[in-house]
């Protein structure tokens, strides 16, 4: 890896290569999203998840919910509590 991505990724690669690894998936994805995604996209996804209500089928609600989950960057317990 080179350039900005390489500079950013080096500490994470070192943590992943440690014995035992000190990098968690949650830490990596949160840092990745903070570095490479627009903050307003995260904010909009969080707002969309908080405002989401089931008005149709469970399948439609679940599909809408998952459209916003990765951009929000929330951990699994938070997503579970938000899925209502």
Image: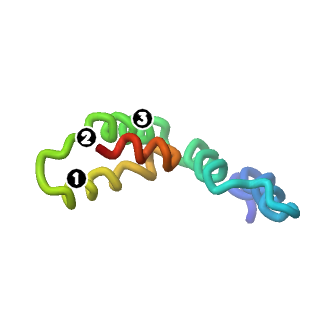
Of badges 2 and 3, nearer the viewer stands: 2
Of badges 1 and 3, nearer the viewer stands: 1
Give the percent coordinates (x, y) of residue 20: 84, 61
The residue under label 3 is 43
Q: Tell me which corner region of the image, top left, top right, bottom left or bottom right, holds residue 3.
A: bottom right
Vertical comparison of 70 with 50: above or below: below
> Separation of disc 1 and disc 3 at Cα?
20 Å
Specify the quadrant that holds the N terminus: bottom right
The residue under label 1 is 61
Specify the quadrant that holds the C terminus: top left
> Separation of disc 2 and disc 3 at Cα?
14 Å
Give the percent coordinates (x, y) of residue 80: 41, 47
Q: Earlier in the sequence, mark 1 or mark 3?
A: 3
Residue sitting at x 27%, y 35%: 51
Callout 1 touching callout 3 (CB < 8 Å)? no
Q: Tell me which corner region of the image, top left, top right, bottom left or bottom right, holds residue 47.
A: top left
Callout 1 touching callout 2 (CB < 8 Å)? yes
The crowding category of the residue bearing disc 2, from other C-alpha atoms within 10 Å (few below 14, some 14 to 19, many at least 20), is some
Label 3 element class: helix
Vertical comparison of 25 with 47: above or below: below
**Nearer to us in this view, 35 or 3:** 35
The residue under label 2 is 52
Give the percent coordinates (x, y) of residue 46: 39, 37
Label 2 element class: loop
Q: Residue furthest left?
A: 56
> Separation of disc 1 and disc 2 at Cα?
8 Å
Label 1 element class: helix
**In the displayed structure, does residue 76 sit left or right of residue 61?**
right
């Amino acid at each position: 890896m080179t350039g900005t991505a390489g500079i950013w990724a080096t500490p994470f690669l070192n943590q992943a290569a440690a014995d035992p690894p000190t990098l968690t998936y949650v830490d990596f994805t949160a840092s990745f999203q903070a570095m490479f995604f627009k903050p307003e996209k995260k904010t909009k996804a969080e707002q969309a998840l908080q405002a989401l209500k089931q008005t149709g089928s469970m399948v439609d609600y679940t599909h809408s919910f998952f459209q916003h989950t990765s951009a929000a960057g929330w951990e699994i317990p938070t997503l579970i509590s938000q899925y209502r």
